[in-house]
Structure formats: structure tokens, C-alpha cells
Amino acid sequence: MEQVLVVSRSLFDQLGAFQGFQPDAGRYLTDLLNPENNFFMDRPAAEEDPSHKQLIPYSLFHHSGRLLCYTRGGKGGEKRLHAKKSVGIGGHINPVDQTQAHLGEQTYNNGVEREITEELRITGSYKQKVIGLINDDSNDVGRVHLGVVHWFDLESDDVASNEDAIQDLQFVPINELVTRIDELETWSAFCVKHVAETRP
């Protein structure tokens, strides 16, 4: 059974719960990635337990004013998001990501790299940074997840899908994504609005 990294909802509330996009990631990440504050939980239980938040790296890929966009196919792990358009690549942090006897920043970073390698084939180098967190308590998916948004600046737009669940992969101008915001899953809509205003 898959296990996923979680933190308590009470910790999130203590650090400052929010709805939407929160650019001040530094205010949260130190405590969220502290091994004393997170642990692995069986995924089926975590999906039905709003007293915990699953930590999800959510990576955006940028090249020349465009963001990588795709449609979620029917074979993706989160059935509640199928057929939605997304600009975020990511997934759960699993025990396979642990390289030491404790959970912490390195375990999290291992999970980020694993998810990207599993889902995309990227040609060329890139630079990346964390630009914020996303939370959406308005629906069943959002209530049990907390996203950490990573911004990848790509040297090349030569990117291909590595999974059937990632379909219609293409780079779309940020300004165009703003006009199509209603087609996006909620987390992607939050991200596009923030990126359009700030251009990280």
C-alpha cells in the first residue's frame, strides 16, 4: 500500500492557514519539513482524513514567457482531477525518497526530482526555486493536500511526457492561460494568476 508524507492540519493552522496562493513559503517550509512534524500515512486513509495535509511538490515549467500545460488523462493517480488542464507537475512524497533514517528537506527534494523524472523527459539545463504554497479547502481534493510550488526556468522547450496520464503537452503563453483560467484545475488557476501578476 502506498504511503505518503503528511503534516497535521493543526500545524498548518498554527503557521497560518490560507486559501489560494501564499508567496511567503519561507514562513512555512522550515516547520513543514522538520522531521518532528511530518510522517508517512497510508494513502487511502490520508485521502479521507482532513485532519492531515499531504505535502505535494507542484512544479511549473517556464520557457520564454510560456508555461508547460497538459490535460490529465484517465490513468492518473487522482481520479478526481481527470480531464482537467494543469500547469503543475508533481505528486506525493513516498518512503522510497528517504535517504536517511529521518524525514526532512533532503527526503522532500528527492521526491521532487523523482516525480519530475517519472513524468517528464527534459532536454537541457534548468534553474529552479520555490515561489510559494497553494491551498484549497473548497473541495475534497484540496482539503487533504498542501502544495509547494516550484518554478523551473528551462534552457530549452524540448520537453516530452513520460506518462499516459500527461496528455496534450504544450507550452502556452502565460497571457493566454489567464484567458483560459476556467479550464484549469484549481491549483493551476491559483498559480497562473500569481505568475501573471509577478512574473517570477
Image (tube, rainbow, N blue to C red):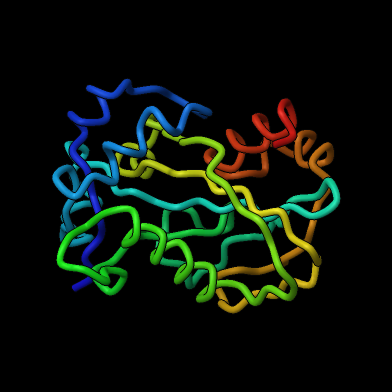
Q: Position of residue 38 (x, y in %)?
A: 19, 48
Q: Position of residue 154 (x, y in %)?
A: 74, 60
Location of residue 130 with respect to 161 vertically, above or below: above
Look at 25% across and 24% down and name the residue there. 13
Choose between 112 and 9: the one closer to the eye.
112
Count how many numbered circles sit on residues in the image: 0
Choose between 94 and 72: the one closer to the eye.
94
Location of residue 20 with respect to 187 vertically, above or below: above
Q: Quadrant of residue 176?
A: top right
Look at 46% across and 36% down and name the residue there. 133
Q: Is residue 22 left or right of residue 41?
A: right
Look at 42% across and 33% down and name the residue there. 135
Q: Is residue 111 left or right of residue 155?
A: left
Q: Quadrant of residue 91?
A: bottom left
Q: In the rendered view of the protein, which quadrant contains the C terminus?
A: top right
Q: In the rendered view of the protein, which quadrant contains the N terminus?
A: bottom left
Q: Position of residue 37 (x, y in %)?
A: 17, 42
Q: Is residue 10 left or right of residue 117?
A: left
Q: Quadrant of residue 93?
A: bottom left
Look at 69% across and 62% down and name the residue there. 126
Q: Is residue 110 left or right of residue 197?
A: left
